[in-house]
Image: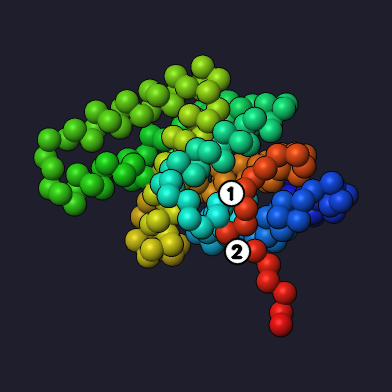
Amino acid sequence: MGFVSLKQKQKSMQEQLSESHNIRLHRALRWLERAEQEMDDDDAQFIFLWIAFNAAYADEFGNENAERTNLNNFFATLTKADKKDRIYQLLFQSFTGEIRTLIENKFVFQPFWKALREHDSSESWKTRFEASKKAAMAKLLEHDTVAVLSIIFDRLYILRNQLIHGGATWNSSVNRNQVSDGTKIMAKLVPLMVDIMIDSPDQDFGALIYPVIPSQ
């Protein structure tokens, strides 16, 4: 499931989708297409996949909710639209691989970096880290897809910040694991999320953050 098949499917559904829904999908798909051109560069592919994901979920201006709340709202909407439970099945199948190793990587756990910056020697972040890892497994077994996605994307968001804000070196040999794992996860989840959105013409995914303005 990649750009070509998803774009063909979106075109076949175009008349059933609202204008904003079509634009949201078109933007996400074009960034997905760009990501697919970076198969040998995990850093670049992750960034383009994140832009595709952002295009899919971005909410309108004026929303005072925090980014985490916006993400969780999107996950809840998407899970509701996922009639065949495909997201949960993917999470369950991938959990013992790249998802588990990402969740167990302290370098994408925000409290670790906060403790480092603040010279906190209490190591209380370790307690939170262990609790987070156990919560991910517990929520998976409870079939709580939204909670599992939230934990995964807490990690992915830190990786996103490291790359976008220049907190990591391109193609560095340091901390390659999280980039590799993060890219694999996004490469599976983003196309699936887009596919579910195409299949959900009656689902409201919100107003576009930047609507299309015709040239004057």
Quarter of the picture containing the N terminus is top right
Would residue 206 be seen by someone viewing this image from the given angle? yes
Q: Which residue is drawn at 69% across and 46% down?
A: 194
Residue 170 position (above or below residue 149)? below
Image mark for residue 57? 1
Name the element at disc 1. helix
Q: Which of marks 1 and 2 is in front?
A: 2
User: Residue at the top extreme?
Assistant: 142
Q: How is the image coloured?
A: rainbow
Mark 1, other Cα within 10 Å: few <14 / some 14–19 / many ≥20: many
Q: Which residue is drawn at 55% across and 20% down?
A: 143
Q: Where is residue 184 in the image (x, y as percent from the top left)?
A: 57, 45
**In front of the other: 70 or 50:** 70
Classify residue 122 by image quadrant.
top left
Tell me the amino acid under the disc marked 1. Tyr
Q: Which residue is drawn at 19% across and 48% down?
A: 116
In the visual, does 30 lie left or right of 141? right
Tell me the amino acid under the disc marked 2. Tyr
Residue 67 position (above or below residue 137)? below
Q: Position of residue 135 (x, y in %)?
A: 40, 24
Residue 39 position (above or below residue 136)? below
**In front of the other: 214 or 70:** 214
Classify residue 145 by image quadrant.
top right
Q: Where is residue 208 in the image (x, y as percent from the top left)?
A: 62, 57
Image mark for residue 210? 2
Q: Distance between the residues labelled 1 and 2?
A: 12 Å
Would residue 93 be seen by someone viewing this image from the given angle? no
Quarter of the picture containing the C terminus is bottom right
